[in-house]
Image (cartoon, rainbow, N blue to C red):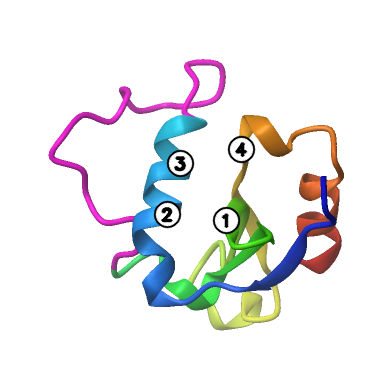
Amino acid sequence: MSESQIRPAVQDDDEALGRLDRETWSPLHAVSPRPRPPYEPFFDDRHRPEEHLVAEIGDRLVGYVRIARPTPLACNAHVRQIQGLAVADSARGHGVGRALLRAA
């Protein structure tokens, strides 16, 4: 398997990220029920592309990390929190999650 490339997310990643998020959903970590159609967009007012880094292998999106401000308080403007991390089953064990966390 080729090495993953990390880049900032863009709006056009919405569909692929939504699909990846649904494929990696698990009752072991999710606090909400399994997503059902019709699916909400991955990006919304609270989760914008600029808060995400994505991992690609070739032309396939295989992972993401969401890094966002945990609070709107001005005194915490310098703080970022990992609020989501997903890696496709097919890419696990190949350093994708590690690369995403290092880039974050």
Tell me which label, 3 or 2, sits earlier in the chain.
2
Provide the residue designation for mark 2: 16
Tell me which label, 1 or 3, sits earlier in the chain.
3
Residue density around tag 3, few if under 14, some if 14–19, many if 20 or more, within 10 Å: many
The amino acid on which the numbered mark 2 sits, given as a three-letter code, is Ala
Do callouts 2 and 1 mark residues in contact (Cβ within 8 Å)? yes
Q: Position of residue 7 (x, y in %)?
A: 67, 74
- Is residue 69 left or right of 44 when viewed as pictured? right
Q: Secondary structure at mark 1?
A: strand
Q: Position of residue 77 (x, y in %)?
A: 62, 81
Provide the residue designation for mark 3: 21
Foreground disc of the pair 3, 2: 2
Provide the residue designation for mark 1: 61
The amino acid on which the numbered mark 3 sits, given as a three-letter code, is Asp
- Report, in whole angstroms, how far the alpha carbon at label 3 lies from the one at label 2: 9 Å
Provide the residue designation for mark 4: 88
Q: Secondary structure at mark 3?
A: helix
Q: Position of residue 47 (x, y in %)?
A: 40, 64
Which of the two residues, 74 or 14, is positioned nearer the viewer here?
A: 14
Which of the two residues, 96 or 83, is positioned nearer the viewer here?
A: 96
- Report, in whole angstroms, how far the alpha carbon at label 4 lies from the one at label 3: 9 Å
Query: Which region of the structure is painted magenta?
Result: 25-44
Magenta-colored segment: predominant secondary structure: loop
- Report, in whole angstroms, how far the alpha carbon at label 2 lies from the one at label 1: 7 Å
Q: Split into 4 quadrants, where in the image is the C terminus?
A: bottom right
Residue density around tag 4, few if under 14, some if 14–19, many if 20 or more, within 10 Å: some
